[in-house]
Image (cartoon, rainbow, N blue to C red):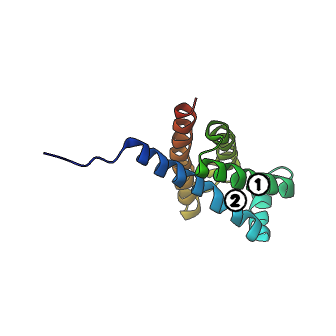
């Protein structure tokens, strides 16, 4: 009996592309909606808000794209681990919020980013 199996490399590539898109699109929107994002960054008291927003957006676009095309995947994933940790610490800081829907939303984003970190760690490991 012949059964067709999808090669595991296919799942790896799809996962890699999805992780890259997760960074590429928000990175682009940091520029397209710069003023809106700057308000959030200032509200969250991120140091050097304009520079920080430009830097994070640039890193997301460059290294998200590299992950999508499969180039420099390990170093790209390492840099995006750093970016994700910073975003979690400054933007999704639910521990600094009073109870309510805003806190629940930021808690959900914080935990979601832990899953994203897991995927990035797998990319680092896979490509060493």
Label for residue 99? none
Q: Residue at x 55, y 62 (%)?
A: 100
Residue 80 found in image quarter: top right
Residues at marks 2 and 1, CA–CA distance in whole angstroms? 7 Å
Q: Residues within 10 Å of mark 1 (few under 14, many from 20)?
A: some
Which residue is the site of mark 1? 58
Residue under label 2: 27
For the C terminus, the quadrant is: top right
> Relative to 38, does residue 68 appear above or below in the rendering?
above
Please give the name of the residue rendered at 51% of the width and 37% of the height, measured from the top-left corner: 122
Q: Residues within 10 Å of mark 2 (few under 14, many from 20)?
A: many
Q: Is residue 108 above or below residue 120?
A: below
Percent across and percent down for residue 83 are: 69, 45
SS class of the residue under badge 2?
Answer: helix
**Residue 6 visible in the current orientation:** yes
Quadrant (top left, top right, bottom left, bottom right) of the N terminus: top left
């Amino acid at each position: 009996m012949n059964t067709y199996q999808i090669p595991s490399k296919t799942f790896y590539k799809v996962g890699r592309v999805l992780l890259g898109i997760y960074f590429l699109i928000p990175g682009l929107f940091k520029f397209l909606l710069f003023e809106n994002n700057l308000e959030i960054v200032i509200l969250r008291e991120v140091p050097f808000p304009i520079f920080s927003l430009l830097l994070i957006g640039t890193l997301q676009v460059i290294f998200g794209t590299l992950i999508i095309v499969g180039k420099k995947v390990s170093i790209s994933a390492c840099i995006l681990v750093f970016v994700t940790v910073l975003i979690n610490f400054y933007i999704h800081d639910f521990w600094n919020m009073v109870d309510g829907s805003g806190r629940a939303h930021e808690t959900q984003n914080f935990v979601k980013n832990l899953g994203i970190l897991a995927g990035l760690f797998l990319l680092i490991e896979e490509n060493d």
